[in-house]
Image (spheres, rainbow, N blue to C red):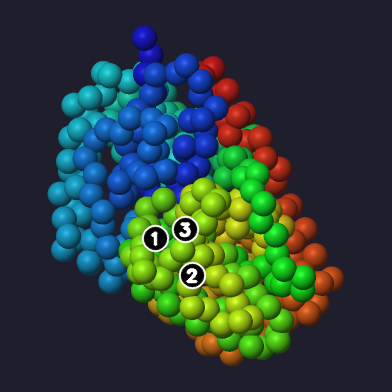
């Protein structure tokens, strides 16, 4: 009996892997989240291997402070444990699927499990192409690579890598619930993406304040819809006493808000957030890309200059004008949101760019078919 091992390095990557797994019916598999506790896999697939939550949430590239904090919290020890576990259990698996950037690919090569299938979510020729060294690693490991767009696949094939584009799995499974919820007449739907890491708890109050200022600026009612990731404790965000559970599954309304502002927290049903939103604001990763692919222009800012320099620049390259990156300044952020609402033609143009960059749904099913066929 063959068994597949999935490894993924981040909350967004976990969600993408989970979507592929949903299309792998009657297949024996296990998952090893390299970052965090793998909440996206709950009730979906058995977890295995060493796990530990790190302060950075996996964001350590080009950010020495994040890297240093993770080192102090046992990052090297965790990596060694993961390598030892993979080597010790390599005979249990007949193929391995690495989801994310090149780090899970490197671990896959070290593990000795073959064949290796790589679901590349982090890089694209729209912004940062895979480097010569990364291409060499993929060739050396004889890795089958399923990347995020055809332009990137073509470039990797020219570098001797077995690469295909069959769609983007992050656009699959985005199906709103069948619930009796509507926006009020004239109400603007604002999606809020506070992220899926520990910093989420720190940024949430700021996003709520920005929502109030946005409502004041527009002089129109605002319905703010907060997308709460599986890894985040919703009661910890604003306090359980401030939340009122609704009849809709995993919907909570924030009490004591302004007359022109309704705020809802929605856990795990991000398509519900998309359905009722016209613009988005946040500090997320995968959620920003999914929103852009849905057709919702996104405003992003970042208080950390290092993150702003590399992560948002990368995301801007991937999403083009579907993403607007602003300075960490309330007036600039509110102005960008208001401009999108007051200029529907520009909003539609940016929406179409986002749909083009992410592509249509169906990628997860096609990826699952390829994984089974190897």
Q: Nearer the viewer, residue 244 or 162?
A: 244
- Calculate the distance from the C-alpha at mark 3 to the C-alpha at mark 1: 11 Å
Count of numbered marks = 3
Query: First in sequence: mark 2 or mark 3?
Result: 3
Q: Is residue 99 above or below residue 222?
A: above
CB under 8 Å between callouts 1 and 2? Answer: no
Cα distance in 3D space between marks 2 and 3? 9 Å
Q: Are marks 2 and 3 in contact (CB under 8 Å)?
A: no
Which tag, 3 or 1, sits closer to the chain's start? 1
In the picture provided, is 264 more to the left or to the right than 53?
right
Q: Nearer the viewer, mark 1 or mark 2?
A: 2
Viewer can see residue 348: yes
**Which image quadrant for residue 287?**
bottom right
Report crowding for label 2: few under 14, some 14 to 19, many 20 or more residues within 10 A (C-alpha).
some
User: SS class of the residue under badge 3?
Assistant: strand
Q: Which residue is depicted at the point 49% across and 78% down? A: 256
Observer able to see residue 160:
no
Pointer 1 residue? 234
Q: Position of residue 333 (x, y in %)?
A: 59, 82
Q: Earlier in the sequence, mark 1 or mark 2?
A: 1
| Rendered residue at 66%/35% (across/down) | 362
Quarter holding residue 27: top left
- At x 33% / y 25%, what residue is drawn? 113
Q: Residue furthest top?
A: 1
Q: Position of residue 255 (x, y in %)?
A: 48, 73
Is disc 1 surrounded by few (<14), some (14 to 19) or many (20+) residues within 10 Å?
some
- What residue would you read off at disc 2? 254
Residue pointed to by mark 3: 245
* Helix, strand or loop under label 1: helix
* Residue 207 position within the rendered picture, expressed as x and y whole percent measured from the top left: 49, 76
User: Which quadrant is home to the N terminus?
Assistant: top left
Between residue 160 and residue 145, name the one nearer to us.
145
């Amino acid at each position: 009996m063959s068994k597949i091992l999935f490894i993924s390095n981040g909350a967004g990557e976990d969600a993408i892997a989970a979507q592929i797994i949903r299309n792998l019916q009657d297949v024996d598999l296990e998952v090893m989240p390299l970052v965090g506790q793998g909440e996206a896999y709950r009730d979906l697939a058995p977890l295995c291997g060493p796990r530990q939550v790190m302060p950075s949430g996996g964001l350590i590239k080009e950010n020495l402070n994040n890297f240093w904090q993770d080192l102090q919290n046992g990052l090297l020890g965790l990596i060694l444990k993961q390598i030892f576990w993979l080597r010790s259990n390599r005979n249990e698996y007949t193929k391995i699927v690495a989801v994310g950037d090149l780090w899970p690919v490197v671990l896959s090569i070290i593990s000795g499990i073959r064949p290796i299938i790589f679901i590349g979510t982090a890089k694209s020729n729209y912004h940062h192409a895979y480097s010569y060294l990364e291409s060499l690693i993929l060739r050396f490991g004889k890795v089958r690579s399923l990347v995020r767009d055809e332009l990137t696949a073509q470039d990797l094939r020219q570098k001797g890598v077995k690469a295909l584009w069959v769609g983007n799995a992050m656009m699959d499974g985005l199906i709103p619930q069948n619930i009796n919820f509507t926006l009020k007449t004239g109400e603007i739907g604002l999606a809020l993406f506070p992220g899926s890491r520990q910093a989420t708890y720190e940024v949430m109050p700021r996003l709520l304040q920005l929502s109030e200022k946005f409502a004041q600026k527009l002089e129109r009612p605002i319905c703010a819809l907060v997308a709460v990731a599986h890894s985040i404790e919703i009661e910890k965000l604003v306090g359980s006493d401030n939340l009122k559970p609704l009849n809709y599954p995993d919907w909570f309304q924030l009490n004591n808000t302004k007359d022109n502002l309704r705020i809802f927290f929605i856990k795990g049903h991000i398509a519900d957030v998309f359905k009722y939103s016209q613009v988005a604001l946040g500090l997320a990763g995968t959620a920003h890309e999914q929103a852009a692919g849905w057709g919702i222009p996104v405003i992003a800012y970042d208080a950390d200059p290092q993150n702003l320099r590399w992560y948002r620049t990368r995301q801007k390259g991937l999403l083009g004008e579907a993403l607007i990156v602003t300075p960490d300044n309330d007036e600039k952020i509110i102005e960008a949101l208001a401009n999108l609402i007051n200029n529907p033609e520009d909003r539609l143009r940016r929406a179409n760019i986002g749909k083009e960059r992410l592509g249509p749904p169906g990628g997860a099913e096609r990826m699952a078919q390829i994984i089974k066929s190897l």
